[in-house]
Image (spheres, rainbow, N blue to C red):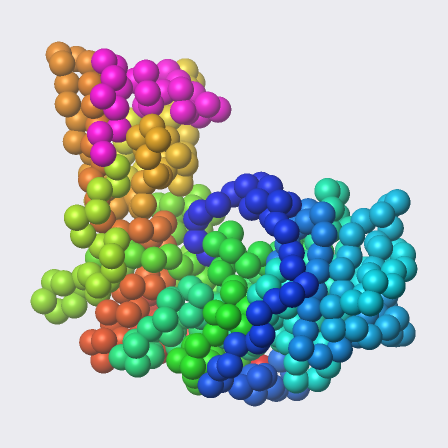
Amino acid sequence: MRAGFSRRLVLVAWGLVTLTCNPAPPPEAPFPVQAPARSSQPEIRIGLFVGSPLVELGSDSDISVMEGDGMASLSHSSTWSVRVSGGRLELRDGSGSSSTHDGPLTFVPASGSMMSVAGRYYRGSASVFRDRTGLTVVNLVSLEDYLAGVVSAEMGRREPADREALAAQAVISRTYALKNVGKRRSEGFDLYPTVVDQVYGGVWAETQLGWEAVRETAGQTLTFNGTPIDAFFYSTCGGQTAAGTEVFVAANRPYLQSVRDEDENGQAYCRFSPAFAGAKSGPAISSRPSCGEFVQPRFGKYGRSRWSLERARTGWRGSPSAWTKTRSRSMGPQYRQILHPVNEPLLRSGAFTLTESREGRVVTGLVADGRGSGHGVGFCQWGAVGRARAGQDFRQILAAYFPGTSLERLY
């Protein structure tokens, strides 16, 4: 899981999406139409859109539509649209014929075909139902097919030298998915397709190397005491990962330790990352007469009486705290919301140092200077790339970032 957009912001953005029923043709790809299946392979539900006013779906073949428990097919067409009308779902096919239903409606393409939603192709089927502000679209897909749309979406399009890093990401993403099935049950699905959970791009995000990583690690999951671990991951650690509790209050796990992520020459494995070195966390945080005028109003519920920045146990990761009149309390990842310049991006990570300027006892400016990107707990994606290029296989990479865990095939 990566820190990033809030769920509320994601929902607002999705509610404005306009969907099209005239998608580009499916991509011609050198990877299989379907992943090698195991009889016990689970299915996962991905909330593609929430609060959408209109849903339009298409395929290069007929799509069957089923209502409710899916026992009876309503009709067949290669294009469909759904909107809310009079409190019910209005279903319209490619010929213009329409009908109303209570829903949910499930759209299943012909065997071997894919379905488009918003011009993007997905494997599996789709379910559409009403939510509080519009329509929710859920992609029902087998876990291995889902992972093929995650690995390269998360890691980018990599070179063959990075193959083991992709395999490690496949295990991490599978572990995260299995650990979090049912996480968003109240919303009608398991996971979001964004950094709120993990990025899922459907068929367009798949690559040959990504598919090979999924097949090579099929069913393999990181466990601790026989259950899937909390598989935290992010972009770039800057040469040292963070212990779980340095960032997340409840992340007290034996396998979420601070790890020195450098080779025998003292070079960080993630040094290939664009966010690794020389990246300012932000320019001068404040050029106002009093830095307190800038920083303190951002504390909100954390109190405004006083502020400070404490060093974490590892000696490099900032961990702000805010004091009220009676007590001190940790702010955790909220420091990225507070310690950033006006009209500038958030701090990329917690691996930073602060330099202050003063006039007498008054702080007149702060500069946050650091390296890395992300929360720093667990799996460093660019570090995995560096380790793969150094000759480590995916098992060694995973063991480095999650010491004490086991690699098990759960299906």
Q: Where is 49 relative to 122, above or below?
A: above
Task: Give 243 or 122, whichever is nearer the viewer.
Answer: 122
- Expressed as whole percent of the image width and height from the top left, the position of residue 82 reads 78, 57
Task: Give 245 or 191, whichever is nearer the viewer.
Answer: 191
Q: In this view, does 203 lie to the left or right of 237?
A: right
Q: Where is 195 relative to 141, above or below?
A: above
Residue 297 is one of the magenta-drawn residues: yes
- Expressed as whole percent of the image width and height from the top left, the position of residue 115 reads 66, 72
Residue 205 is one of the magenta-drawn residues: no
Write the residue at 62% across / 80% down.
Answer: 41
Which picture quadrant has residue 331?
top left
- Expressed as whole percent of the image width and height from the top left, the position of residue 56 reads 70, 60
Q: Where is 20 relative to 338, above or below?
A: below
User: Is residue 186 among what the camera can see?
Assistant: no
Q: Is residue 356 left or right of residue 244?
A: left
- Magenta stretch in the rendered image: 283-307
User: Is residue 277 among what the camera can see?
Assistant: yes
Q: How many labels does the image show?
A: 0
Write the residue at 76% across / 65% down.
Answer: 80
Write the residue at 37% across / 57% down.
Answer: 234
Q: In this view, does 327 lie to the left or right of 69?
A: left
Write the residue at 71% across / 56% down.
Answer: 55
Q: Which residue lies furthest to the front in this view?
A: 95
Q: Residue furthest left?
A: 265
Q: In this view, does 222 lie to the left or right of 284?
A: right
- Look at the image and tell me in which quarter the C terminus lies: bottom right
Q: Where is 280 relative to 198, above or below?
A: above
- Expressed as whole percent of the image width and height from the top left, the position of residue 171 reads 45, 73
